[in-house]
Amino acid sequence: MTLIDFAAPSIGSDFDTLRQEVRDFLAQELGDYPPELRARSWNGFDADFSRKIGDRGWVGMTLPTAYGGHGRSPLERYVVMEEMLAAGAPVAAHWIADRQSAPLILAKGTEAQKREILPRIAAGTCCFCIGMSEPDSGSDLAATRTTATPEGSGYRVNGTKLWTTFAHKADYMILFCRTGKSEERHGGMSQFLVDLKQIKGITIRPVIDMAGEHHFNEVIFDDVLLSGDALIGALGGGWDQVMSELAFERSGPERFLSSFALIEQLVAQVRHDPTEQQEIEIGRLAAHLMVLRQMSRSVAGMLDRGQNPLLQATIVKDLGAIYEQDVPRLARSLLSRPSQSASADSYTAVLAYTVLNVPSFSLRGGTREILRGIIARGLGLR
Ligand SMILES: Cc1cc2nc3c(=O)[nH]c(=O)nc-3n(C[C@H](O)[C@H](O)[C@H](O)COP(=O)(O)OP(=O)(O)OC[C@H]3O[C@@H](n4cnc5c(N)ncnc54)[C@H](O)[C@@H]3O)c2cc1C
């Protein structure tokens, strides 16, 4: 009996040429990029780097050529993403736009939105942030309080968004807010395209994380006027739109490669003379990584075939976060005190960064408890 259909992954040798091109490019671009910056994984922000990979045709790969994209398959995009993440490339400036804002705009945006925004995303020059969470609404998105009230031909927005990654650098936010009555719960939600660089009345305040870094923000909308053409999709259709974004958000290789820089550092430290325990545990890590990779590729294949793998994507994210979070614990138990050398300093720096960041891996993109509720529902258990 098959409870969950993870279709056979179908990335084959056809993509070896593309993979090699990306590897060659990354070796040249990031030759002396330090391990402690590679450890930032998809949180590393470098607008110039995003523009360069846009020039190579590796952003907006699956978008139609009519909108500046490259008409390539999700599986080709997958190859590029996993090479970028494995190398610790600084992809944050285009990551959210490429992963979820572009597919949303392509599916639900107006023709004008598609023509204006998609070519800029594909060029790697347009940065997006996600305005979903609020001070009193994270897991329970339906409790969203930010409102967009119809006014003239547009909307007046009031409310506060929280934990908005890179709002301070982004060109646009996809704002999720209430346009209907609170009794409507899901039916009264809509999404808007908000130009953060042009529109007045938006205050963006930094929220410093426990590693001392600034990527989170609080974004306050104080009587902000949006024109009618800022609406994405149908008025009141925001809930369904957000739900279909989540399969894109949850299944990619970024959901199990966030600690990959640490695995590489660990292997580099012990490879010449490993103990038996180090061999066993690193072998186990590699085996788990391969299984997660197969599952995640399978979801990419399902998206490619137009299926809706929300359940499968949720499972990948939950198992991926467990894996990513276990890496620093294991690294510390296998190699707590490396020998003195420059490479040992890199190992320690990458370990320290990863330790401070792993708690967030099972919060961002949906907390562990919420994911397990979705999985239980998908299995018919609730
Ligand atoms: C690194 C990072 C980046 C982020 N970036 C963004 C971003 O760019 N844009 C954005 O909008 N948000 C972003 N977030 C916010 C993230 O989506 C929320 O933190 C998350 O959805 C949880 O919401 P919350 O923090 O309000 O916690 P709460 O929803 O208050 O949850 C607190 C705890 O209660 C548990 N809980 C809540 N409800 C239930 C339930 N029904 N059953 C069982 N347990 C429950 C949760 O699992 C959690 O452990 C980011 C978060 C992180 C960590």
Image (cartoon, helix red, strand yellow):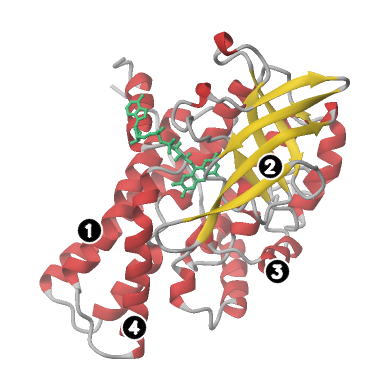
Q: Please tell me the numbered disc located at residue 325.
A: none
- What secondary structure is found at the residue carrying circle 3? helix
For marks 1 and 3, give the one nearer the viewer.
Answer: 3
Residue hosting label 3: 48
Quadrant housing residue 239: top right
For marks 3 and 2, give the one nearer the viewer.
Answer: 2
Q: Does 13 appear above or below 291?
A: below
How far across and down, in percent of the image, does residue 366 sit?
43, 36
Distance from Cα at disc 1 to Cα at disc 3: 37 Å
- Label 1 amino acid? Arg
Residue hosting label 2: 173
For marks 4 and 2, give the one nearer the viewer.
Answer: 2
For marks 4 and 1, give the one nearer the viewer.
Answer: 4
Which quadrant of the render holds ligand 1? Answer: top left
Evaluate if marks 4 and 1 touch, with contact meaning CB atoms under 8 Å apart. no
Dot 4 beta carbon under 8 Å from ligand 1? no
Distance from Cα at disc 4 to Cα at disc 3: 28 Å
Q: Does 31 appear above or below 249?
A: below
| Mark 4 surroundings: few (<14), some (14-19) or many (≥20) residues within 10 A | some
- What secondary structure is found at the residue carrying circle 4? helix
Choose the circle earlier in sequence order: 4 or 2: 2
Quadrant housing residue 307: top right
Choose the circle earlier in sequence order: 4 or 3: 3
Residue hosting label 4: 345
Which residue occupies the foreground of this view, 277 or 372? 372
How far across and down, in percent of the image, does residue 53 sit?
69, 64
Quadrant housing residue 94: bottom right
The answer to whether any part of residue 100 appears in the image is: no
Residue hosting label 1: 284
